[in-house]
Each structure stands twice: as structure tokens, then as C-alpha cells.
Amino acid sequence: MKNELVLVLDFGGQYNQLIARRVRECNVYCEVHSYKMTIDEIKKKNPMGIIFTGGPNSVYLEEAPHVEKALFELGIPVLGICYGVQLMAHVLGGRVTTPVTREYGKTETQFVSDSLLFKGLPEKATTWMSHTDYIEVVPEGFRVTAHTDACPCAAMENAEKKLYGMQYHPEVLHTDNGVQMLRNFLYEICNCQGDWTMGDYKKTAINNIRETVKDGKVLLALSGGVDSSVLAALLAEAIGKQLTCIFVDHGLMRKNEGDEVEQAFASWDINFVRVNAQEQFLSRLANVEDPETKRKIIGEEFIRVFEQEAKKIGVVDFLAQGTIYPDVIESGTGDAAVIKSHHNVGGLPDHVDFKEIIEPLRLLFKDEVRKLGQELGLAEYLVWRQPFPGPGLAIRIIGDITQEKIDMLQEADFIFRQEIALAKMDRDIHQYFAVLTSMRSVGVMGDERTYDYTLALRGVTTTDFMTADFARIPYDLLAKISSRIVNEVKNINRIVYDITTKPPATIEWE
Ligand code: XMP
């Protein structure tokens, strides 16, 4: 059975995959294609609807992406977003102009309530605007269905021809009811029934992998994080023994984590190699205090260990990478300043012989990766694992690293995580962990004076990890955690809770 399909035509906007993901959230299968797709190609796909993304251009520029007028005459519903709606207006004979000021950010918007696009939604709401040009005159047969103080046409439609568009971005969460507007487009206007699920995605992904890999060998660096674990499960299901996973245990994971990863994959019919390289990493890190140097050493060492192991397997056909969509955008932004050189386990090795890289999770967002993991039957604790930096506890021990400090931090962090889980706050706090500071202070235990380490607890709530707020953990819970840690972990006599946001602080301390 073939799924209902909606095409997203990409005009170069930054949110193109986000639109696709919102459509998938509405249970409709969706593919992103270039705006250059021809009318014949579109017809062959027989889509239920087409969505135009935004883009950085002005419709009047010669090099600006265009579409043929015939596209609007196919009888297929079209929704234009931002540049997409301007292009629709321009091609169909409306007028787009450049006003004196651009409109950017959250904007009060007034809607016409009898539009199908806004069915069931309030007449006034906030939308997310990001544009220079706007539509001054709508094409013949269209009416204006929303406006703001600065923008006379924030949405327009020709209901008879099923052509719709909006100047703002419904796909970003800053737009109130944005997903509902997309849902209205899909269900009320395109007449979709919503027949797409993560189960379908799994099947398609498995088929694609089998087609690409054929009888080739695939190598994967497994870190135990969500992305690489889900990828391992997906590949295991698709190609079984043709897959070898190498799990480099650098000894800087959280308590028990190395064993947990090994256990989780023990029952899968794949080749699983665990390399216990704790001592090797520790000796390379001895007396190193600078965070970036630590990251560099761990990155290099990781690649070296991985290469040594890979050599034993010989030539492989494919190297699999757990790249997900946010990594694709972040690595594509070019001139952003490097705050921390994020070494992600799985960086490219120079000396492993492989023919091609495959990245089957490339188009998924984090929560979709988790859903896929659940669909594949991966253990809950792996699917819901909070993000954990590639360099691990090395960047949560301030200054130099010793085995003693690792042990201390693992114990303290374990207690913290245990209590948060017990309080059922583990899904509300997006990342939480302990940091062993290099500071020691005076305390008293029994009748004895102590001079021991200060441990910091950090918990943040965030949507994208680019900005974050500190989590409001109740005082009583903090009190319990603090008392357990100082009582149960030797050489820690003081606990502090980090109450800074990001920015100006970062999430990790190093
Ligand atoms: P910061 O500390 O930059 O962290 O606010 C943002 C997110 O990135 C994670 N992080 C890292 N991840 N290698 C990684 O793979 C690293 O070196 C690294 N440093 C920070 C951090 O845990 C948070 O989720």
C-alpha cells in the first residue's frame, strides 16, 4: 500500500526540514524536494498537497528560485510559506514590495475566522515573522485572510483553487497553533486521512539500507548515546551480521554505563566489539587541565583506538554515522564562533578503509529518533537517555583527571540521577549531572575537620541546548540529594546547585 504523500518544495529556507517534520507529526508522509522539480515529476508522485518553504531571496531578483504558473493549475492544493507565499502572489499576478522596515519576531496577528486554514482557531494570536518583503496586492481571485500592524497581508487564499499561503512561519513553535494550521491544510484542504506512522518510516529506512548496502560490510562506532544506539538497532534489523559495532569504552562514562550498553546489544544478532581502553585514555589525560586540550586528546585517542580495532576487520564497504538533522544544520552554519569544539564520538577516522558513508538518521529530529528507537524495541533507558558529551566525565571534572576523581564523580552523579528519577522529574529536566569542581573547602564531620571537594549539581530545561534555563528542582529534593552525596561519597563535603542560565553560562562547566 502506498502512503498519502505531501511534497515540500525547498526554496532554501532554514526551516525546510522542520516543515517536513511537522507534516510527519500530523501522520502524513512527506518528502522534501528542490523547487526545481518539474511539473511532470510532481505529477508522477501524485501528491495530496504541496508546501513551498521560505527562502532568503526576493522574488524580483533574477537568480531567485521560481516555479511555473502551470504548477498552480494542477488542481493540487498548495500552501506557500514566507518566500513561498510571495512567490505564489508574484507568479499569479499580485504585487510584492519591500517596505521600509522588516518585520522580525513574535507578532500579534489578526485572522479571518472563516478560512479553512484557521478552522477552530482564535481570531487573534502570535505568529513568528521573519521577512523583508511582503505582499502588497494579492492576485485576482485571492483574499487576505490575516494581517498584522506592519504587514497588510499575513495570509492569503484562493479557496476555490485550493491555493493558500502565509507570511509567517507556522512550523516554528513561536507561532501559536502553527501545527494546527498545517494540520488544517493537510486534513481540511488536501483531504489527507493521516496514514503514516513511525512504523512505516522504519520499514522504508530498512528497505533503503538493504538496497544501498546489499551484501556489503558496515562499521559503526557505537557511543551508547541515543543516536548511535538507535542507528545500531536499525542496522541490526536491516542487515544483521553484516554490521560490526565498535564500542570504545574510554572509562569516562557514567556509572555502569559501559556494561549497560554492552548488555543492551548482547541479544542482537550483530558483531559487537567492546574495547576497554580506560587506562590508555587516563594515561594520555594525566595532568591535563585545559578543557579544549582534553577534548582534543579524547577525540584523537578515540579515533586511534577505533582505527586499531577496525583494522582487524579489514576493508569495510560502509561507515555508518549517527548524524541527525540538527547536526546537519549546525555543521552547515560556517562562520559561527567556536565556543566549544564539540567532539562527537564517531568523528571521521583517516585510516579506516571504507568506500562510503551512510547516515540513515540524517533527516530525523531527536524526538523522532527516540520514537524510531522505541519502534525498534530498543531498551527504554537507551531511548530516553539524556544527552551526554562525547568526552564524557572528562569535562565534568574541573582540571586534572584521576581515577579517584572519576570514581567520586560517578558515585555522586549516580545518586543525583537516582533521586531525580525517583521524584519522576527525569523527563522534565532535559539534562542533569554532577560536576566535580577543583575547589576544596573546610567542613566538619563528626568531630573531625574535613578539607574536601565541592561538588556542583547542574540541571537545565531547554528545547535546543543552544539556550537553557536552570531547572527549578524543589529545595527538599536538593536537600535529600545533598545529604545522600556527602554521606555516601567519600571526599565530598559540600554541594552547590548551579543557578545560571545559558547564556551567559554554558550547560557543561568546561
Ligand atoms: P554547552 O556546554 O556548550 O552544551 O552549553 C550544549 C550541549 O552540548 C553538549 N556538549 C558536548 N557534546 N561533545 C559533545 O558531544 C562535547 O565536547 C560537548 N560539550 C558540550 C552538552 O552536554 C549539552 O548537551
Image (cartoon, grey):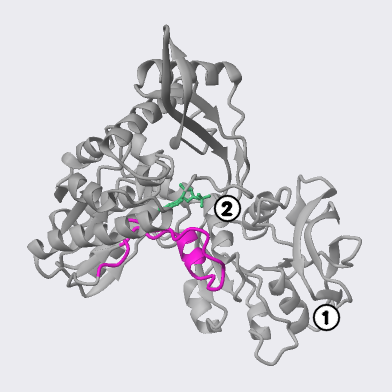
Residue furthest top in the image: 447
Amino acid type assigned to the residue bearing label 1 in the image: Gly
Q: Is residue 314 above or below residue 456?
A: below
Q: Residue furthest front?
A: 449
User: Which circle marks residue 466 in the picture?
Assistant: 2
Picture quarter with the N terminus: bottom left
Q: Which residue lies most toward the right here?
A: 149
Give yes or no for residue 337 being in the magenta stretch: yes
Which residue is at the front of the view, 284 or 204? Answer: 284
Where is 149 relative to 428, above or below? Answer: below
Q: Position of residue 266 (x, y in %)?
A: 16, 40
The residue lying furthest to the bottom in this view is 62
Tell me the number on the disc at residue 94.
1
Helix, strand or loop: magenta stretch: loop
Indicate the quadrant where residue 410 lies: top left
Q: Amino acid at mark 2?
A: Met
Magenta region: which residues?
321-349
SS at badge 1: loop
Residue 399, percent from left and from top = 40, 45
Q: Residue at x 20, y 40 (%)?
A: 262
The mark closer to the camera, 2 or 1, is 2
Where 224 sits versus 15, above or below?
above
Q: Secondary structure at mark 2?
A: loop
Q: Residue at x 41, y 38 (%)?
A: 384
Q: How many marks?
A: 2
Q: Is mark 2 within 8 Å of ligand 1?
A: yes
Residue 167 in view (yes/no): no
- Relative vertical location of residue 436 with respect to residue 272 in this rendering, above or below: above
